[in-house]
Image (cartoon, rainbow, N blue to C red):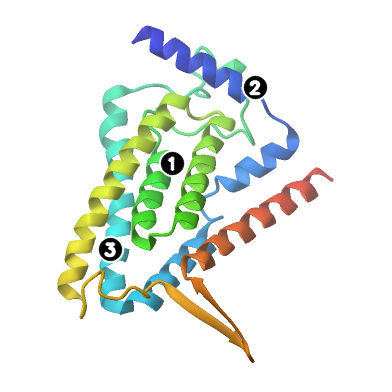
Amino acid sequence: LDFIIEIDTYIFLLLNDFHCAFLDYFMMTFTGKWTWIPMYLMILYVLFNRFGWKKATCYIIGIALTILIADQLCGHLIRPIVERLRPANFANPISNSVHIVDGYRGGPYGFPSCHAANSFALASFTSLLFASRRFTIFIFLWAFINSYTRLYIGVHYPGELIIGAIIGVLIGYALFYMSKMVAQKVAIYRYKSDPNRFYGQFSLGKFSIVYHNSNAIILSGCVIIFVILIYSLIALI
């Protein structure tokens, strides 16, 4: 165990050492709790638009429980038992070697990462829900970057992010299938009876294009990332 902790610490210090002013602004904004609200609202819109309010409500409750369970399990059950100090915590011997951003050091303990658990829980649940390869790649890449920001700003070791991600994925998958069973009971038709449930159509005169609804979520996420990039560049001036 000591060897694993040493390797985890070494990798953390190696990766945390790669920083610059631009990335400080970018990572701190990316990891903000309010930054991604537009994308979350788009997820809600797509759910209600494609499933109707009964089925959408089942999945929304499922997503809420997924994140709640992941967060509470990591933050209030495992952390108090393990009591592993965050890298940036003043009581940690390596704290003076850690690059932090805006003086943020987080709470006392960090194993496992709630941020990673919540991000990957949402990613796994919605990837199964929307059943789109493009969306799956996007949402898991988002979850990865969102988790990595915690290492960059100095509040989590790599191992904490990995364990948090695993917990999040397992909970996300389990809660999706539970939500799916409930949704099938309350829906007028069963889950697979409407093959076009995720597709919409945009028409302008004779021009028409069929698109996957999850593309709207991807677009909203990309717009947010673009805004973060612009903000980070302006903040350097």
Q: Is residue 153 visible?
A: no
Q: Is residue 129 above or below residue 32?
A: below
State left or right for residue 234 relative to residue 34.
right
Name which residue type carries label 1: His
Q: Quadrant of the N terminus?
A: top left
Dot placed on the residue nearer the N-terminal end, 1 or 2: 2
**Residue at point 33%, 75% (across, down):** 51
State left or right for residue 36 relative to residue 197.
right
124, 134: nearer the viewer: 134
| Residue 201 coordinates in the image, percent (x, y) | 51, 81
Residue under label 2: 17
Dot placed on the residue nearer the N-terminal end, 3 or 1: 3
Dot placed on the residue nearer the N-terminal end, 2 or 3: 2
Name which residue type carries label 2: Asp
Q: Is residue 183 above or below residue 120?
A: below
| Residue 117 coordinates in the image, percent (x, y) | 37, 41
73, 4: nearer the viewer: 4
Q: Residues within 10 Å of mark 1 (few under 14, many from 20)?
A: many
Q: CA distance from mark 2 to mark 3?
A: 40 Å
Q: Which mark is residue 61?
A: 3
What kind of element bears circle 3? helix
**Residue at point 45%, 55% (across, down):** 133
Residue under label 1: 115
